[in-house]
Amino acid sequence: MEFDWAGETPKFLMLMYGLIAFVAVVGGLLLLLDVVPAWFARRQEAQLVAASTSGTPLPRRRKPREGLFALFFLLPTLLLLMIGLVVPAIRTTLLSVMNRDGSSWVGLDNYGWMFSEDSIIQVLTNTLTWVILVPLVATAFGLIYAVLVDKARFEAVAKSLIFLPMAISFVGAAIIWKFVYAYRGEGDQIGLLNQIAVSLGGQPKQWLLESPLNTFLLIVIMIWIQAGFAMVVLSAAIKAIPADIIEAARLDGTTPWQMFWRITMPSIRPALIVVVVTLSIATLKVFDIVRTATNGNYDTSVIANEMYNQAFRYQETGRGSALAVFLFVLVLPLVIFQIRNLRQQREG
Amino acid sequence: MAFARSRQALAIAGVLGLALGATACGTGNDKGSDKTGSAECSQYEKYKGNDGKKVTIYSSIREIEADRLDQSWKEFEDCTGINIDHEGSAEFEAQLPVRVDGGNAPDIAFIPQPGLLKRFADAGKLKEAGADTKAMAEQNYSPDWLKYSTVDGKFYGAPLGSNVKSFVWYSPKTFQEKGWKVPETWDDLIKLSDEIAGSGTKPWCAGIESGDATGWPATDWIEDVLLRTAGPEVYDQWTTHGIPFNDPKVAEAVDRAGTILKNEKYVNGGFGGVKSIATTSFQEAGTPITTGKCALHRQASFYANQWPEGTKVAEDGDVFAFYFPAIDPAQGKPVLGGGEFVAAFADRPEVQAVQTYLASGEYANSRAKIGDWVSANKKLDLNNVPNPVDKLSVGILQDPKTVFRFDGSDLMPAAVGAGTFWKGMVDWINGKDTATVLQGIESSWPK
């Protein structure tokens, strides 16, 4: 079919506006970042020159000006944070105590609904299963792998193999695994898992239909993706253990077992915490895998998926917001813990 | 250094600005009224007087279907000078409320869910249709249709395209080879199913997997059967929650549908057992008919576009459809279907002119000639409908004996119609019993 350039003009215009807006904003920022510090520098220079010629002591009020200066640099970030994060967060919280179209107050009804509806309790238990299993298993797997391949002969290749799934998006991974779990009632199986089951003399199964097995099968997808992340971070931490500590331990005659528990583990503790917390946050927010693989059917839904469904598909804005707030409350302590941990590390 | 960089950025901005200026010059609206005096424009006389005005339309219609739409109102645009700007989106249902609530509503939206239309009407966002539009719609569409875009006595727009859902797809070739007859009553349908099952083939195939809309084909099944067992009045009460969702009559209809859908002897030809219905995509669900692994597949008229390349869709071809037979002759000829409504968020004269034109017989025939389109418009000439299934559909829609009812899940609140009803059907196929499933859906109905 011939492409109708004239007919598509509005779209190109839109694209053009977008590009211009982008250039204007970025160009403007660059200009400001260039001009304003230069202006401050020139002023200071002029003051210095004036001070040196007149022989008077240098002006001492530099602190407040620096504060102003910092504020100038923080302003765009603060503004964007305000528009993109603070305002929506407040609005979501307000919506969560309102009815479905935000026209009247209902108090904590939406929260009450969340903890009384069987299907939502199922969603919460599923999320709990996810958040317990994924960080633990992915970190454990990553750690064991990192220790085993450390200084092995094909270390680089072995690590790449585990790290590769990180490059695949959650949606892509979910589709790949959907094929692994695929079922055909008649003829040849196209799913790896069913083919294995059949060649071992078993019956093909509809893996994704059976609760609670299906939730575990979905969790496997997340672990498959995230183990690589855990492995890379932990492997770097292991390599950063000072050689003299290891040497001293060797001289004292430690067994590999003691080496792992007494030397490796305490040394990589900060990295371990970072990995577990990061994975926990990512897992709490998991959406793409569930949505792509089962769309939350067959009792596999998780909070983020249910939140989207309630708010945007069922037009139940109040309930969706309540789920969003609940998710936020769950993630918050982890984030605080992470920040405090990082701060301690920097100070220590 | 930094200064040089920002200068570069400014230069880029400048160049882009120039380019924009140039494009803007190139797009001067040359859809002028040079044709307005010609003979073919005489039929658009009553829409005149809005030259150079623009009307934006938002819908879920995309790609080739959207091109056909543009083509269908091209003459109208040329003659009246009204510029129709149509935008189709795959996220229409989710995005339209966002756009409307955000103060960025299109002039017109083609809304396929009367439930969504009612929501906008109740919120005062929709504009009542003009007198001309109303007169045109009443002239061309049956009251069965118009009541779906009438909220509290106010009329919000005429239907546009439609589809007929009460179809069973089959292979005329296979039927002829095996000596099977197209059933005309429910009993014949069951007899035929038993005969096919006896010959070692599973007669029915079905699939309800449809991404984030998984479950909808099963809701159509239930609605179609309920319309046949309980009749249109009960059906209307059910969709408006006049009777509970789990009324015994509904339970009876679900169980009746279950005698086919949950019958291991009948399903699921080409795919496996009953549970494979849940994971079979609706697009591929009917394809075993072409390979003889299945004989019957209940799905809407639009399934005509899903057959593998090279399949001849015709009464004497590889596949065709017959009317899903009635159960109780006293209930007439119930037909389940869907369609979209031309609702407006603005009442400028040019918007109303477009609304009126889209309700007219001229438009229906203009669009039908381009192909792959069905409408309940009474002025639509069957000779202008090229494709056999569409012809069959239009014939059914225009049949005075037809009792038309809109797809129930589109009438219910989204939390049920696009939520728990779909999910409930998935659970039902997956082995849950009828009472539990219906009770669950009933308790989710927004109070």
Image (spheres, rainbow, N blue to C red):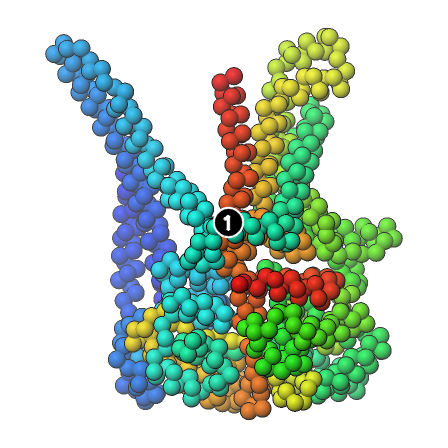
Q: Is residue A71 above or below residue A6?
A: above
Q: Splitting the image into 4 quarters, where does residue A281 fall?
A: top right
Q: Where does the image place residue A299, in percent across and percent down from the top left?
A: 67, 53
Q: Amino acid at mark 1?
A: Leu
Q: In screen coordinates, is B126 left or right of A228?
A: left
Density class for disc 1 (Cα within 10 Å; few <14, some 14-19, many ≥20) is few
Spot the residue most to the right.
A201
B170 relative to B384 in the view: left or right = right
The image shows residue A61 at horizontal and vertical percentages of 23, 18
Residue lying furthest bottom in this view?
Answer: B400
- Residue shown at the point (67%, 13%) measured from the top left: A246
Q: Position of residue A282 (x, y in %)?
A: 57, 40
Q: Which residue is located at x 27 percent, y 47 percent?
A: B14
Q: Is residue B321 visible?
A: no
Above or below A206: residue B140: below
Residue at the (53%, 44%) spot, across then down: A326
Relative to B430, is A37 above or below? above
Q: Nearer the viewer, residue B416 or B305?
A: B416
Q: Quadrant of residue A35?
A: top left
Mark 1 = which residue? Answer: A108
Q: Chain of mark 1?
A: A
Q: Position of residue B235 (x, y in %)?
A: 60, 78
